[in-house]
Amino acid sequence: MTKSNQSEEYWEIDEKEEDAPTIQLTDEDGRSLLCYIEKSVEVDGEKYLLLMPVDAPIEIFAWEASDDDEDEESLVDIEEDEIDDVFDTAKAVLSEQELILQRSALTLTASGDLPDADEEDIITLDVGEDEDDVTMEQFQLLASFFYEEQEYAVCTPFEPLLFFARMDATGKPELLSPEDYEAVRSQLEDQLFDELE
């Protein structure tokens, strides 16, 4: 499977307090995502924010039989229209654990207290854009369900999901595109590393 996101291996995330500052990201479809402001830095006169969702990020994967061995299965990403199809079922399944699944901006999220992870609930996946850029990422399996004879898994990543945003001229946060992020990446990392020293 493949999965892309901005760099998230550099910063240690502190436990949140109730009065931790937050900001809301909004996507082009009008969906919102409430985030904690992890760090704020300035580069070339512009303000950048390192953000982490307040609620738990959620991924829905489909189980798919291996081409080489029908007895082996792997988890694969699903497209947006398939998420639309299975969303209500996934929401109902998570509600049994008192988790509320939400169509947030940028990622699905679930509000509520996540259950403790048992060893059998931990899934390790190879993620990356291509074979030369593959990393291992661990997820907690929250639930499984069937929709039209296809089995799905609802998971949350163990590693924090982080986003970089830039404050625009009106004072609203704007998610950085991959190209914009790469253009200022080294300057952002230099400042964030300096703050951690």
Image (cartoon, rainbow, N blue to C red):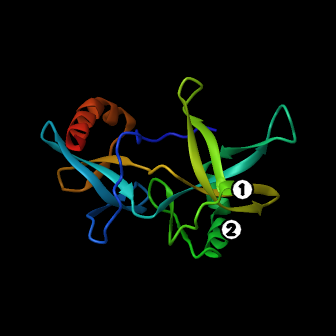
Disc 1 target residue = 152
Q: Amino acid at mark 2?
A: Thr
Which quadrant would the N terminus be assigned to in this image? top right
Outermost residue toward the right in this view: 70
Which quadrant would the C terminus be assigned to in this image? top left
Kindly report the distance in space between the C-alpha atoms of the residues bearing marks 2 and 1.
Answer: 10 Å
Name the quadrant containing residue 145.
Answer: bottom right
Instruction: Give the percent coordinates (x, y) of residue 167.
Output: 22, 50
Nearest-to-viewer mark from 2 and 1: 1
Residue 78 visible here: no
Is 7 or 103 nearer to us in this picture? 7
Marks 1 and 2: in contact by CB < 8 Å? yes
Disc 2 target residue = 89
Q: Residue sitting at 86 percent across and 35 percent down?
A: 69
Question: Up-down: is 112 above or below 193?
Answer: below
Instruction: Give the percent coordinates (x, y) of residue 26.
Output: 36, 58
Is 130 or 17 nearer to us in this picture? 17
Q: Residue sitting at 44 percent across and 51 percent down?
A: 160
Callout 1 environment at 10 Å: few (<14), some (14 to 19), or many (20+)? many
Report helix, strand or loop for mark 2: helix
Q: Earlier in the sequence, mark 2 or mark 1?
A: 2
Q: Residue sitting at 36 percent across and 32 percent down?
A: 179
In the image, taking residue 14 as reference, residue 58 lies left or right, namely right
